[in-house]
Amino acid sequence: MQLRKVTAASAAVLALALTATACGSDKKDSGSGDGKKITIGIKIDQPGIGLKTPDGKFAGFDVDVATYVAKELGYKAEDIVFKETKSADRETAIERGDVKFIAASYSINDERLQKVDFAGPYLLAHQDILVRADDDSIKSPEDLNNKKLCSVTGSTSAKNVKDKLAPKAQLQTYGGYSECLTGLENKVIDALTTDDSILAGYASQANFQGKFKLAGFKMTNENYGIGLKKGDADLKKKVNDALTKMVSDGSWEKAVKANFGPANYKNEPAPKIGNIVK
């Protein structure tokens, strides 16, 4: 008889647990700003842009932009779930619904527009090079001829320089930008190339401040946009409205200075929504 009572009590507890689980499962990304979760794709390994810190938090300009946009969509900070989206996976993550939107140094181009839509742009970056602060030997891209130029494996930035601007550049490819920076600091290489915003983010790290400088060559135009599911016109308008407000209330400029300021990054003014600079 006692056994029957315990079993009945256990069944009641189990039923309550299942009910709670069912209720909890509704806390998904609805995209409606009603207090439920929103999942946003970011980079987690780019200082100044998107970085997961040792304490598990996220920092960077893209993180600040994404947080501001989410707030304007009705989400509190605790409702945001940041998800790493590597460059090769961004379109798939959006199409599959893994994320509501992506803010991850995501340049708008014709190829990507075949698969996803973009709000913005919210930053105009340029391909540039980073050199040692005391190196005045590289005054133009052509001066990279016979210099050791570094970028990461698979990047098109260094190839762009070698193919179009400095064919005699000695291309060095490393696994990550941090390795390039170490090589640059130790004079194993002469210059590092990628988007100026990414370079500024790395140069702004406390252990690198004052050691490097951006050349300011502006070799390409990179319009960073927020990637969205194709055809979601309502969300695109809401995100564009949020970006416009971020610029007008001064939050955009504040985020630029906070994330890139230590590298003396001479950023372009905030671009106008829909203005893609070729």
Image (tube, grey):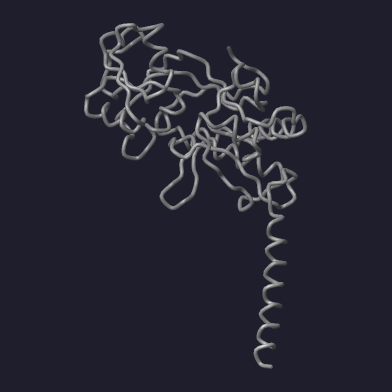
- Locate the C terminus and report the quarter of the image it occupies: top right
**Coordinates of residue 52 in the picture (x, y in percent):** 46, 44
Q: Which residue lies at the image location 62% right of the left edge and 44% below the top edge? A: 39
Q: Which residue lies at the image location 57% right of the left edge and 38% below the top edge? A: 41
Q: Left or right of 3: which side holds 128?
A: left
Residue that extends furthest to the right in the rendered view of this protein? 234
Q: Left or right of 210: which side holds 223?
A: right
- Locate the N terminus and report the quarter of the image it occupies: bottom right
- Front residue of 260 and 189: 189
**Coordinates of residue 121 in the picture (x, y in percent):** 62, 24
Q: Which residue lies at the image location 46% right of the left edge and 41% below the top edge? A: 51
Tell me if residue 146 comes above or below residue 82 in the rendering. Answer: above
**Coordinates of residue 100 in the picture (x, y in percent):** 66, 39
Q: Left or right of 64: which side holds 95?
A: right
Residue that extends furthest to the bottom in the rendered view of this protein? 1
**Coordinates of residue 112 in the picture (x, y in percent):** 60, 21
Tell me if residue 220 comes above or below residue 69 in the rendering. Answer: above
Q: How many labels, in total? A: 0
Tell me if residue 41 comes above or below residue 107 in the rendering. Answer: below
Image quarter of residue 203: top left
